[in-house]
């Protein structure tokens, strides 16, 4: 837990503050996803197997000359017969193309990176470096390396492939390469979807080009790759683009376009594109699975259940363990949506878990000691694949015992086993790094940091902050149900522009012009507002929604903005910041039992790191309440559950908008946003989750002790009009 010293700290200049702060304003959730974890992951996997199966593992990781880990696939020796045969069939084809493709791409990326970035960035750094304090310089440099190197690499790749495609716009291989690179950036750089429209458009262009070729071919030749071979399209998934058949290219393009629509929260379009892929190849596993996942978000549980059943029919060896995550979700939401119900899932997992455990145990010490370095790494990668599958299977069994059998002992056993497997595939939690982030924020943003009279008058953004699993999705859905308010989910335009904002503030603070900072703030506040609005309108046009009104408020639900309140206040001193707070133990137990996307929140599955993250969140909220009294408005989750009609009216009143009765029908609205809470919010307000941690109170006792006084220290709703209603 971080220090809570109340000693006043001297104000930090804006120039040094933004440099020290570096990239911390970028959502902490995604920072760790850019770190090279390959080596420690493989080592921890080996240790896990050694401890649990009494087989010593010797980690051996082969790297390229530049230090990057080799791309590896699971060794076919440790996979099913069908998968082993598939890998053997395609290995020779893949190897022929891989070296050439890698060389060409690396050369283009390097050229684009040098041309696009060196001159601009080096000049700026040379001009500003003398003005930094040594401490600011070091911290800025260290944090930059975590993210900007990845962003530069992706942008360099996009630039090179974009030029390549522009020079040859009829080449569908180049169109696909460019579209795939754009989608890769959207997956790894969360900036409000800055390149989503271009990626979608490029995929459509590539598809049209491929279809022109496809229609011109004889039907029997559409399934032949360039070597005249015919492979199952699921097998072609592993091949370089130029080794695939025309039909394989078209199926893959539709599937990737569907996933790009998914990233853009255009879920109906995503389903439609998966349907196009499945029209060409009914057994294409990627589209079958991801289509089902998308149907869950849309609340179409019967269709999703049928789709998951289809996956199980095709995947006889049940190698795609993700299907059980989906099945458990639809069973919780609507028990009759999956044929065979809980019993079928439990029966399957009762057979599969021991099989996968035996496979994991079968990777013997002699195997690990023999062969080339690459083959050793492949065997270690096979361990990781098996452990990740076992994690998902045990989580599905936890869901069964938690929701259906109500056997807390068995539920906890499965949850614990799932997380033992998960932690074995993660690098150690970097507590010191997280402490440094919080301490740096508190040292920078103190009384006197914010210049008087600086900030936009805009009230367009509404920021929701808090800890994961605290009720933020429910609050966003309430706001979104107002006709003049739109929820935009967790892909924040504001967060995506924080790098630019920080750099612009550095430049402005060194100009000597007292109005320079205000100009920067006004410029970027307007840019965030305009970009958010235009992207929302673009989505509505793609959805062909003829009934929506033009919103005047947009909800930014990037919860990790809890660390960015200082910058939010600088740009938007009049914007609403809502902190949704839930009973502490309910919050952290809900976070503990849910699996998050890869990143910092992976570590909520372990008590010590979860307690650290929760304590740091509470520490930051206390800090903002201290240095900006009343700036953050607290909304208690339990008040939403017990008193939604009155609390909802107070929330809308705080936005400055008139009340609309549709707000209370939030759970009926068709609008879908991809969050972990999607299925719960569709139920409306329900009380089942209140004090849910009590069922596992004995198991959670160590965690409760780790959060100390915070366990009993809850927030109260501070909405002005709600307080008046309560007094009445």
Image: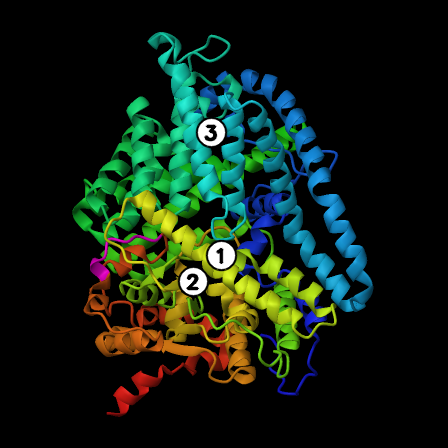
In-image side of 569 versus 255 (left or right): right
* Discs 1, 2 touching: Cβ within 8 Å: yes
Q: Which residue is mark 3?
A: 79
Measure how far apart labels 1 and 3 are at the Cα level.
Answer: 42 Å
Q: Which residue is mark 2?
A: 556
**Residue 394 drawn at (x, y percent):** 38, 49
Residue found at the very far right of the displayed protein: 130
Measure how far apart labels 1 and 2 are at the Cα level.
Answer: 8 Å
Query: Is-magenta flag for residue 671?
Result: yes
In the image, residue 339 sits, relative to residue 470, either above or below, namely above
Residue 611 can be seen, yes or no? no
- Secondary element type, mark 2: strand
Question: Comparing marks 2 and 3, which lies closer to the viewer?
Answer: 2
* Discs 1, 3 touching: Cβ within 8 Å: no
Question: Which region shows up in magenta?
Answer: 667-673
Query: Is-magenta flag for residue 531?
Result: no
Q: Name the disc covering residue 493, or none.
A: 1
């Amino acid at each position: 837990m971080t220090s809570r010293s109340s000693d006043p700290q001297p104000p930090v200049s804006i120039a040094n503050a933004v440099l020290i702060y570096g990239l911390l304003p970028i959502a902490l959730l995604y920072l760790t996803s850019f770190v090279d974890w390959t080596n420690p992951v493989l080592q921890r996997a080996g240790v896990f197997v050694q401890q649990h199966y009494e087989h010593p593992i010797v980690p051996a990781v082969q790297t390229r000359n530049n230090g990057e880990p080799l791309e590896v696939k699971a060794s076919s020796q440790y996979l099913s017969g069908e998968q082993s045969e598939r890998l053997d069939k395609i290995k020779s084809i893949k190897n022929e193309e891989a070296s050439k493709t890698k060389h060409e791409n690396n050369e283009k990326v390097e050229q684009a990176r040098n041309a696009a970035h060196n001159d601009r960035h080096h000049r700026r750094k040379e001009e500003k470096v003398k003005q930094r304090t040594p401490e600011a310089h070091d911290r800025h440099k260290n944090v930059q390396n975590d993210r900007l190197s990845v962003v530069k690499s992706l942008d360099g790749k996009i630039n090179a492939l974009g030029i390549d495609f522009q020079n040859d716009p009829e080449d569908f291989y180049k169109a696909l390469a460019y579209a795939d690179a754009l989608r890769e950036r959207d997956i790894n750089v969360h900036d409000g979807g800055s390149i989503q429209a271009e990626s979608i458009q490029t995929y459509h262009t590539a598809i049209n080009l491929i279809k022109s070729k496809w229609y011109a071919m004889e039907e029997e030749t559409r399934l032949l790759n360039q070597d005249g071979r015919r492979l199952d399209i699921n097998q072609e998934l592993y091949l370089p683009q130029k080794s695939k058949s025309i039909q394989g290219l078209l199926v893959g393009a539709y599937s990737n376009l569907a996933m790009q629509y998914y990233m853009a929260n255009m879920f109906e379009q995503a389903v439609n594109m998966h349907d196009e892929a499945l029209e060409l190849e009914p057994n294409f596993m990627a589209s079958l699975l991801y289509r089902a996942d998308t149907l869950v978000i849309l609340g179409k549980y019967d269709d999703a259940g049928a789709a998951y059943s289809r996956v199980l029919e095709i995947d006889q060896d049940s190698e795609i363990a993700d299907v059980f995550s989906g099945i458990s979700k639809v069973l919780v939401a609507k028990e009759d949506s999956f044929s065979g119900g809980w019993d079928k899932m439990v029966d399957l997992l009762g057979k599969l878990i021991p099989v996968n455990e035996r496979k994991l145990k079968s990777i013997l010490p002699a195997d690990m000691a023999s062969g080339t370095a690459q083959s050793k790494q492949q065997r270690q990668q096979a361990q990781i694949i098996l452990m990740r599958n076992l994690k998902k299977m045990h989580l599905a069994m936890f869901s069964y015992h938690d929701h259906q059998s109500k056997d807390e002992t068995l539920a906890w056993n499965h949850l614990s086993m799932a997380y033992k497997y998960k932690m074995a595939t993660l690098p150690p939690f970097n507590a010191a790094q997280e402490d440094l982030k919080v301490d740096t924020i508190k040292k920078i943003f103190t009384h006197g940091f914010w210049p008087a009279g600086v900030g936009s008058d805009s009230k367009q953004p509404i920021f929701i902050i808090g800890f994961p699993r605290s009720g933020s999705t429910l609050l966003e859905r309430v706001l979104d149900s107002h006709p003049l308010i739109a929820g935009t989910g967790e892909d924040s335009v504001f967060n995506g522009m924080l790098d630019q904002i920080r750099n612009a503030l550095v430049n402005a603070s060194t100009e000597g012009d007292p109005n320079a900072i205000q100009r920067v703030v006004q410029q970027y506040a307007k840019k965030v507002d305009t970009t958010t609005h235009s992207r929302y309108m673009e989505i509505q046009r793609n959805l062909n929604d003829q009934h929506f009104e033009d919103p005047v408020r947009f909800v930014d639900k990037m919860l990790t903005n809890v660390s960015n309140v200082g910058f939010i206040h600088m740009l938007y001193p009049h914007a609403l910041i809502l902190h949704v707070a839930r009973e502490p133990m309910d919050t952290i137990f809900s976070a503990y039992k849910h699996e998050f996307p890869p990143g910092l929140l992976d570590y909520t599955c372990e008590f010590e790191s979860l307690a650290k993250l929760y304590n740091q969140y509470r520490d930051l909220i206390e800090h903002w309440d201290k240095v900006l009294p009343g700036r953050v408005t607290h909304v208690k989750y339990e008040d939403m559950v017990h008193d939604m009609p009155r609390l909802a009216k107070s929330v809308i009143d705080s936005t400055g908008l008139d009340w609309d009765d549709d707000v209370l029908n939030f759970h009926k609205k068709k609008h879908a946003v991809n969050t972990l809470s999607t299925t719960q919010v569709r139920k409306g307000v329900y009380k089942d989750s209140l004090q849910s941690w009590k069922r596992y109170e004995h198991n959670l006792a160590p965690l409760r002790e780790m959060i100390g006084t915070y366990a009993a220290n809850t927030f109260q709703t501070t909405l002005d009009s709600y307080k008046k209603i309560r007094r009445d």
